[in-house]
Amino acid sequence: MRGLPTALAVLALVTALAGAVVAVLRLRRGRAVATAEQRATYDVLHTAELAAEPLRAGLTRASAAKAVRHLRALVGAAGLAVVDATQVLALDGHGDHHRAQLLAAAQRAVATDRSAVLGEPDLACDRVDCVVRGAVVAPVPVPSGHPNAAIIAIADGLPAPGLVQATLETARWASSQLAVAELESSRERLARAEVRALRAQISPHFIYNALGAIASFVRTDPERARELILEFAEFTRYSFRAHGEFTTLAEELRSIDRYLTIERARFGDKLQVRLQIAPEVLPVGLPFLCLQPLVENAVRHGLSRKPGMGTVSIEARDAGAECLITVEDDGVGMDPAVLAGTSAAGDESADGQHVGLSNVDERLRAVFGDGYGLVVDTGLGAGTKVSMRVPKFHPGVRP
Amino acid sequence: MGSSPYTVAAIVAVTLVTVVIGAYGLRMARTTSDFLVASRAISPTWNAAAIGGEYLSAASFLGVAGLVLKHGVDVLWYPVGFASGYLALLLFVAAPLRRSGAFTLPDFCEVRLRSRRLRKLATAFVLFIGWLYLVPQLQGAGLTLATVTGSPYALGALLVGGVVTANVALGGMRAITFVQAFQYWLKLTALAVPVIFLALHWQATDRPPVTPVGGTTFPRATTVVVERPATLTFPDGATLEVGHGERLEFAVGTPVPRVSGVDAEFGGDWLLPGDRHREDGGLFGTYSLILATFLGTMGLPHVLVRFYTNPDGAAARRTTLVVLALVGLFYLFPTLYGVLGRIYTPHLLMTGETDAVVLLLPGAALGSGLLGQLLGALVAAGAFAAFLSTSSGLLTSVAGVLSTDVFGRGGMAQPGSVRGFRISAVLAGAVPTLLALNVFGLDVSQVVGMAFAVAASTFCPLLVLGIWWRGLTDVGAAAGIVAGGGASVLAVLVTVAGPPMAPWPATLIGQPAAWTVPLSFLVMLVGSALTRRRVPADVGTTMLRLHAPEPLRPEPDRPRTAPAAGVRTAGTVKA
């Protein structure tokens, strides 16, 4: 029963696995550096990389403490301090009891924006075992709006020209890392601003139309008007909420429900809705307000200009480790060329739609990666179908 | 038992209904214009039935009864452990895992330990466990089809493997909750209804004893055709050498002989725990089995993905509680089949194909009349439901992991693209189908038991320590998984393909959980303690997220149910 073939198969499997492990190890070893020169280059770059990682989070006490050890290795000094305008952020190696002198020197250097070399008279101390004989102070130019900073290399002899050079270069390098940090944080700010911009974008037309629709019910059907106002209040609370970058599909659907309730007050039976939501994907986390603009587009651009009835279908399907969401309307559709941005003319509303879609598209890509953008199927008179894929789990998404 | 037309019809019907509901179920059940209906979360009861439907596999449906028939009271730990695994899940894992937002086990590694390498390691073990669990499902399918229609063994395995793979690959049967819940009730009905008739029949025929004083006897005249040379030992001590092709006729009331090479218990041993004739640490094996099944359930990939459907941690807990009840109820029946099989199908003790007892019992006890045929068809349908639901659930999880973690990041296909998922599904289905065609002769339940042992030695320590100990590090976790998982995987390979061994090592290798689980825990604890510096900096935030109930979440994500909501409800009621 447990024949020889099985034993052979297992043996082959084990051999294959062992072979794979050996191959991986070989490859790893192949990457090792050969000559001393290459090794030196590698070491410097590696140390720089280690120092860069904390610096890219901006210059704080914590990040300086992590980076200072690697910076000292880069400069090759007896000690190294990272100082900002008011305090010594971190110090590695010798010279801890010179903090006050170092801070004063750094403040002078930053104020004049010139590097300085300190000798023994500047660093007087009465400790017998003190090895500190000199120091090089180099200001680190930081992006505007940040407290100034400097790095100080502490030497156990008169600072050699090489040390001065190394310190200046390291300061310049650290400055560029801080600039990268600034770039990253401004990109994040931009992304947040985009979310805010999107919120601003959905409201004006809609608020105007909604209030108009509600006003028309105030006398004829006060009860309905009251309900609509409450729906409207809930809708705005969700759309204008200031916190949380992510939401769940269930929450987003609830908001869309309120939106459509109000729209139906305007359009009446002209607007039909068809939903097909797999309950398994309701807890999926997705960027806040990334579905509602699509529905709004479907109603505003797809249906409102179309005579007769129009249908919006929202579909969410469970597909293994991800969820497929489509928003479809049978409205007037649009020219794919406008959407692709190749048509110069492009009337205003199609352009507005374009902006709304590309905003959602960009945010989806920013969160989940480039494979997860919007897919739009449309043609003039053929309706519009917008689909997106959302992974059920993504490390950055916390609804 | 010949192929009854009802049986084939029932199997075809179950397969078709499953496929059709899978393809059109969502469209039929959830197309609406009402958002309240569309955004309603699945209730814990439905979700629990779905977990039950996916969990109760061929091992539960066929294997447990077969083992009880063979070994008696000793193996009651299988059903007990299979059910009580959910207790461990409920106590230690269910709610925090749901709150973590992880969909699969590799996801949990990433949430908790922020390590992509650990994620890869976990992926490898998810694949191994998934495949190891799929093999016995396909084996069971082959056995069922061979038993009820007389077709070759390979046909059934290929058929179920092919149907399930095609379905998952083409997007039909993606383990939809309602389909799987339906499968649970189908399986329960398929076992419970015949057992009522069997019990009535047993009452009506003066309650024949399960363990007669003179040994188990044939209830009817039986003909056994010998396929392998063997030695028969009769209860009176006489022995008989038989060769290939011999036909043995047994009259009514003849005692059933022992067959060399078939491991079964006779007489009073069957009713007593432990085995007096063996000196191989049966107690150790039992403890090992208890540990594996009790702790292994939380490491099964297809069970964990279902918890994602729950809206929050509390719902996850309620779901687990209901699963415990549903699964516990289910396991009463296979045990009864095993006991009644002792009376009505003792010839299986000679052939060793005890896994077939559930399928053969209705026909054997109630005769080949209409009732016997109909009940036989019902049981066969239930067995097929078991293979289809469990294998499609497993295949979906394995293919999902393959497509996101193996192909997606390797650049072969766009991460998670439909094409990538299809390739993964075909690959995920092909591997166990090939294995099932080549490995046979192992009890279905034992292979499943090995999958549980591997899960218990890898993911149980990872989940329990990850959720309850802040000190766990990625290095420690990886070391523990490699040590415990490596040992148990090796044990599985040796059991499946290794040489025969002395009793004690055989038990150590055949039921490894009692030493691999503690080993894995120990290595994880020591490894983490040695690499304390690698504890993720945001471990406090992660722990808060895992353990704080959703309404107490620090980030004010959820809209508070403030006065506005109350007013709204009042308005709705009025209207």
Image: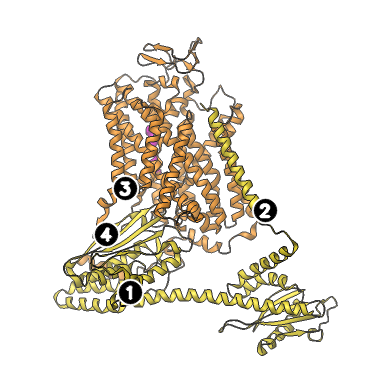
Chain colours: A yellow, B orange
Give the crowd class for mark 3: few <14, some 14-19, many >=20 residues within 10 Å.
many
Above or below residue B150? Residue A189 is below
Give the magenta range.
B324-333
Is A153 displayed left or right of B292 in the figure?
right
In three-dimensional space, the C-alpha distance between marks 4 and 2, rounded to whole angstroms, equals 56 Å
In this view of the protein, which residue sits in the foreground, B549 or B542? B542
Are the two marked residues, 2 and 1, in contact with CB atoms closer than 8 angstroms?
no
> Which three-letter amino acid code belongs to the residue tagged 4?
Leu
**Magenta stretch contains residue A207:** no
> For residue A90, which quarter of the picture?
bottom right
Q: Which residue is mark 4?
A: A275
Q: Chain of mark 4?
A: A
Mark 3: amino acid: Phe
Crowd around label 4: few <14 · some 14–19 · many ≥20 (10 Å): many
Q: Are marks 1 and 3 in contact (CB under 8 Å)?
A: no
Q: Is residue B325 magenta?
A: yes
In the rendered image, the residue lying farthest to the right is: A128
User: Chief secondary structure of the magenta span?
Assistant: helix
Q: Nearer the viewer, mark 2 or mark 1?
A: 1
Which element carries disc 3, helix, strand or loop?
helix
Would residue B334 be visible to someone looking at this image? no
Kindly indicate whether the residues beneath marks 2 and 1 are on one polypeptide chain. yes
State how far apart marks 1 and 3 are (Cα): 47 Å
Name the mark on residue A343: 1
Mark 2 and mark 3: span between their CA atoms? Answer: 52 Å
